[in-house]
Amino acid sequence: MKRSYAYEERERILRFVSSAREGPEFSTFTIPQLLELACLLPPAPSSSTYRRWKREEVSREDHKARLSRRGRHRKLSEQQEKLLIGYACARRCSLLAVTQADLIDFAKYVTSALLSLNGGSHASLSELASPLRKR
């Protein structure tokens, strides 16, 4: 399985392999064997990954930016997520159960309420949540 390597670990592996290749004590080891020795947590990077790391000069910022582009895009914005979390916390503080259906209903209600606002004015959160308190 592929894994991401921290910038420090990547640099440490590169330094270990290059210094091991220069010294006589590891002269009989192959690159994959040296990568296995250098890597603290399995799996070790492949030989092609090692060669790519040597070829590319990557700064800490570039490495961080590359990792941030990985993975699935968010379905909810941070603000929407906080709103759902706040709703769930409010229900739990009132000793009410929080189910997936409750969260979906709340999200649909908020979305429809925001879309139905007249003249583009924004309702406050308390105005949007007031019908929910009657539940």
Image (cartoon, grey):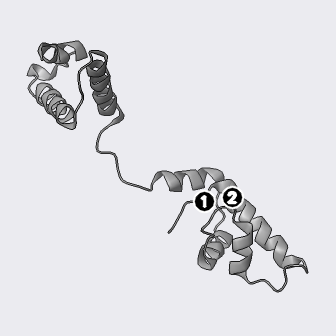
Number of residue marks: 2
Q: Residue at x 78, y 65 (%)?
A: 15
Residue drawn at x 12%, y 17% as measured from the top left = 135
> Please, what secondary structure does the residue beneath circle 2 have?
helix
Q: Position of residue 46 (x, y in %)?
A: 60, 75
Q: Considering the numbered disc 1 on the image, is that residue within a helix, a strand or a loop?
A: loop
Q: Residue most toward the right?
A: 24
Closer to the camera, 55 or 85? Answer: 85
Residue 121, numbered circle: none
Q: Name the one closer to the observer, 26 or 15.
A: 26
Q: Quadrant of residue 84?
A: top left
Q: Amino acid at mark 1?
A: Tyr
Residue 55 to residue 76: above or below: below
Q: Tell me whether circle 1 and circle 2 mark residues in contact (CB < 8 Å).
A: yes
Residue 25 occupies quadrant: bottom right
Q: Residue at x 51, y 54 (%)?
A: 67
Percent coordinates x, y for residue 51 in the rendering: 65, 76
Percent x, y of residue 2: 51, 67
Task: Note whether 10 is above or below 77 in the view shown.
Answer: below
Residue assigned mark 2: 9
Q: Amino acid at mark 2?
A: Glu
- Classify residue 110 as left or right of residue 118: right
Disc 1 to disc 2, how far (Cα)? 6 Å
Label 1, on which residue?
5
- Badge 1 crowding class, 10 Å Cα cut-off, few under 14, some 14 to 19, many 20 or more, is some
**In the image: residue 59, left or right of residue 84:** right
Percent across and percent down for residue 83 are: 29, 26
Alpha-carbon neighbours of circle 2 within 10 Å: few (<14), some, or many (≥20)?
some
